Image: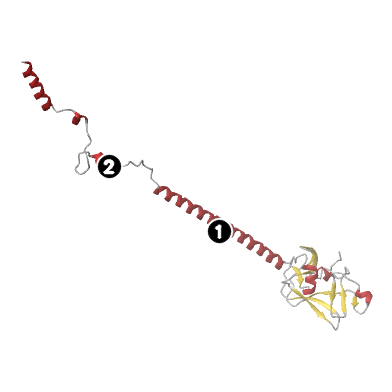
Amino acid sequence: MPEISSSKPYRIGRSKTGLGLFATRKIKKGTKIIRYFGPLLDSKNKKHDDIDNKYLFEINNRWTIDGSTRKNIARYINHACRPNAESDVSSRKRKVIIRAIKTIEPGEEINYDYGTDYFKIFLKPIGCKCDHCEKKRAKKRAEARAEKLRLKLKAEKKAAKKADKAARKATKAAGKTKPSKAVKKPLSAARANPHARGTGKPTKTKASRTKPLSRVQPKAASRARRAS
């Protein structure tokens, strides 16, 4: 790890993505922080054009800075979608300066936006780990959990409502149902009152088959007279 002069307002330290550059004192907005430097590569030179690493900083269509050298302290500055610094590119001088675009407090990590092309090639496949993207992902995870919980509670409420409705329906049906009674066949009018008028011939009883005494006595009296 390269040594950094104590007069510089930054230091190399541990970051979420590995190593990063951190402010050692307050850096005011608009302050030039550090120069991004390294060998210049000419796109017209085939040998230069074949060089490929993640520290290449394109100045224009022809010139590119190869910042892979460890002496280039600016190579430790990480990408951020909501940065506190920016790259100030001078095509004519073929120089790149990292400048603060907001006040950076001591201990705060220095970062700048690497650009759309770099993001698509190197960062998007693995996911950007800057604070803004981490917060956005955390927010999405929280929203997903909240939505999952909402759907679960909705399903439970619906099931409880359905069960309550079924219970009330069963209770109502049980209240309407009464114990069944044996149905007695009604007697006909003749059998219920055999002597009622207009019901046909009366039923003979034991008393009606007995001969009246008035008919027996005269016959007995005539037999007594003959015997005398």
Q: Name, please, the residue furthest toward the bottom.
A: 92
Q: Name, please, the residue furthest toward the front.
A: 226
Q: Name, please, the residue furthest toward the top.
A: 228
Query: If the image is split into quadrants, where does the N terminus sit?
Result: bottom right
Q: Is residue 106 left or right of residue 59?
A: left
What residue is drawn where x is 66% and y is 62%? 141
Label 2 is placed on what type of residue? Answer: Ser
What residue is drawn where x is 66% and y is 64%? 140
Q: Nearer the viewer, mark 1 or mark 2?
A: 2
What residue is drawn where x is 53% and y is 57%? 158
Inter-mark Cα distance, 1 to 2: 65 Å
Query: If the image is split into quadrants, where does the C terminus sit?
Result: top left
User: Is residue 22 at all visible to an observer of this figure?
Assistant: no
Q: Is residue 109 left or right of residue 215?
A: right
Query: Residue 68 has which mark?
Result: none
Q: In this figure, which residue is indicated by the disc labeled 2?
A: 188
Q: Nearer the viewer, residue 86 or 177?
A: 177
Q: Nearer the viewer, residue 27 or 226?
A: 226
Q: In this figure, which residue is indicated by the disc labeled 1?
A: 154
The local crowd at label 2, few if under 14, some if 14 to 19, many if 20 or more residues have their Cα within 10 Å, is few
